[in-house]
Image (cartoon, rainbow, N blue to C red):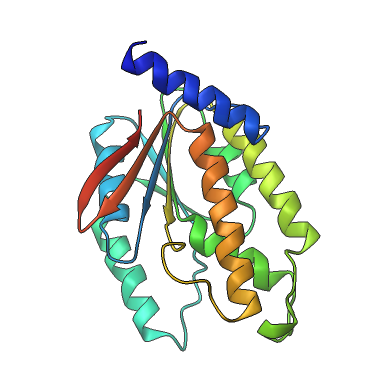
Amino acid sequence: MASGDSHEEQRAILARQYNIAMTADLTFILGGARSGKSAHAERLAAQSGLPVTYIATAGIDTQGDPEFAERVRIHRERRPAHWTLVEAPLDLAGALLDADRAGHCVLIDCLTLWLANLLFAQTPGADADEIAALPPAARDAFAAFDAALASTRGKVIVVSNEIGLGVVPLGSVTRLYVDELGRLNQRVAAASTRATLMVAGLPLALKG
């Protein structure tokens, strides 16, 4: 069997396993902190030659967190000024559906912050130790995002962190977060045409 056929067969099997449709042109980029995943995603978007909508899942309020504010500043300065910026800390599916169209590129950065927003926004005021399960609204948001990905007509690039390579976390909410992000990453990878793991700035092809 040709390599391309093998990839397509594996992709179809994974999509059936996770009960999701495969997206026509979806690139999924994973990596750890400072692995170069965002910069690589931005290069791919720029090289596509298409108009780009950048969907940022981080909220705009960085008061009280100067280190995170600096990260946001670096991202903003690195992006071309002519790209359209959309901030979607919660309704990622809606933002994707609004931005998607044929002959267009949508870059989503990143699923990691989106999950954190969903986890804590739906349980305001709760202590971290009190969050024992993913809120129903977050599961609905996952389902809506899966459906939005399956319906896209343009090019989509999605960025996420790979955080499941260490030991099992001690805290219950951290375990929940790591588990749910791992499941989310698997679903997006199953729907993707290409998947890349970034390590020390180097792209390692996982799929496609």
The residue positioned 49% from the left and 26% from the top of the image is: 11
Picture quarter containing residue 20? top right
Using the image, determine if residue 91 lies above or below residue 186.
Answer: below
Q: Position of residue 206 (x, y in %)?
A: 34, 38
Query: Which part of the image, by quadrant, shows the N terminus?
Result: top left
Q: Which residue lies furthest to the top in this view?
A: 1
Q: Is residue 82 visible?
A: no
Front-lying residue, 109 or 130: 130
Q: Residue at x 66, y 68 (%)?
A: 119
**Residue furthest right in the image:** 136
Q: Residue 44 appears at what percent x and percent y? A: 27, 39
Residue under the image location 76 percent in, 64 percent down: 135
Quadrant position of residue 201: bottom left
Whether 102 is drawn above or below 128: the answer is above
Residue 120 drawn above or below residue 30: below
Q: In which quarter of the image is the C terminus?
A: top left
Badge count: 0
Which x, y percent locates residue 183? Answer: 59, 51
Q: Residue at 53% x, 27% y: name it.
A: 23
Quadrant of residue 21 within the rendered picture = top right
